[in-house]
Amino acid sequence: MDFTLPPHIEEYRRKVRAFVEDRILPEEADPAAYDEHENIAPAVLERLRGEAKAAGLWAPQMPKERGGQGIGIVGMAASYEEMNRSIFGPVVFNCAAPDDGNMMLLNKVGTEAQKERWLQPIIDGKVRSAFAMTEPHPGGGSDPSMIRTKAERKGDCWVISGHKWFITGAGEAQHFILMARTSDDKRKGLTAFLFDKDQPGWEIVRRVPIMGPEEHGGHCELRFDGLEVPDENVLMNVGDGLKVTQIRLGPARLTHCMRWTGMSKRAMEIAAAYVRERESFGSKLAEHEGVQWMLGDVAMQIEIARLLTMKAAWQLDRGNFARKEVSMAKVHVADTLHKAVDTAIQLCGARGYSKDTPLEWMYRYARQARLVDGASEVHKMVLSRFYMDESDGFWSWS
């Protein structure tokens, strides 16, 4: 098995790493570079985005003919890890959720007209987007078959009514992908619709306060009461909504893993730098056996996380859905992120708990990892079903 990155991907990865080191980390260290929601301030973001475009590092997940870099999913895994050495990194390169997953979905299944209208402005960084699926009880969450938001035919339009919440980025999104029920068919009852922020018939009820720092646009509660969407803005076909969710969420879950692996590594960088210098009981902390156990364990877990993520990326590049591989990566990387940040805080002591480092920001952010894009328990259920169906074939080499 050859884990060497192809030369063009390795070159891109190195450029991303250098850009993060030279241009983004200094901004991250400046309190004035943050907005009121603890993310990168708009003016700083736009300046850095312009520099990333000029450096040829913009939108690596998109085809070159649309202004991206076309490096494939394995290339994304290597470079996204480098981007999230900074908490500001992914959004600077236009690789942050939810735009990242929405771009990949639209590029894969949208018509040429839909790509021009809905996708290209996101790639260009002119607008942001959101994916509106999750609903309050008794609506759909991890189980999309429970979705209750309805779309009813009216002439050549669909009229939508319903309730969504925790819709990431909705507060600043211009383009939306909305999941709604068009029939009671268990497999073909959902449809994906495209709509614009400026259309009437819907509203943002509130921006839901959360424990951690927020993505741009927050996590919002939405109500739909008469939103009209024409047939031309149906994504794929009527009844293909479940297929749309599967196409979008698998790769999107994996891109979370790519980014979280980078954040895990950054947390350990901070901890390692501290224990190399800090003395206790006559020696450097790094010389204490207990500290070495902590560092070695997390380093091993991060390497396992990278291997799981890269195997799933390789499978996706080969045209497979990689549901089993993505679920394994999602569970393990989410746990590893929390363990890495928690360990780093413990090793840095009061300094880690303070705002003198980004560790406390990462700690609050990390708790969501075991929930977003399917709770860890849901993915373990998926893995159990695979094992019961495949038995020893679960670990096939093919």
Image (spheres, rainbow, N blue to C red):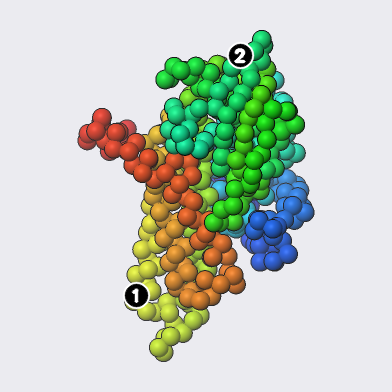
**Mark 1 belongs to which amino acid?**
Gly
**Mark 2 belongs to which amino acid?**
Arg
Which residue is depicted at the point 74% across and 52% down?
42
Which residue is depicted at the point 48% across and 44% down?
372
Quarter residue 228 falls in: top right
Whether residue 395 appears in this view of the structure is yes
Residue farthest toward the bottom in the current orientation of the protein: 282
Say left or right for 313 vs 217: left
Which residue is at the front of the view, 26 or 22? 26
Which residue is at the front of the view, 337 or 275? 337
Which residue is depicted at the point 34% across and 76% down?
289
In terms of secondary structure, where does tag 1 sit?
helix
Screen quadrant of the C terminus: top left
- Vertical position of residue 238 compared to residue 278: above or below: above
Q: Residues within 10 Å of mark 2 (few under 14, many from 20)?
A: some
**Residue 83 coordinates in the image, percent (x, y):** 59, 52
Q: Residues within 10 Å of mark 1 (few under 14, many from 20)?
A: few
**Residue 46 coordinates in the image, percent (x, y):** 75, 50
Question: Contact, CB < 8 Å: mark 1 with mark 2?
Answer: no
**Residue 247 coordinates in the image, percent (x, y):** 50, 29
Say left or right for 248 vs 291: right
Residue 97 is tagged as none
Q: Nearer the viewer, mark 1 or mark 2?
A: 2
> How far apart are the two marked residues, 1 and 2, measured between alpha carbons?
65 Å
- Vertical position of residue 349 compared to residue 124: above or below: below
Query: Which residue is denoted by mark 1 in the rendering?
Result: 290
Q: Earlier in the sequence, mark 1 or mark 2?
A: 2
Query: Which residue is denoted by mark 2 in the rendering?
Result: 153
Which residue is depicted at the point 55% across and 23% down?
150
Quarter residue 115 falls in: top right
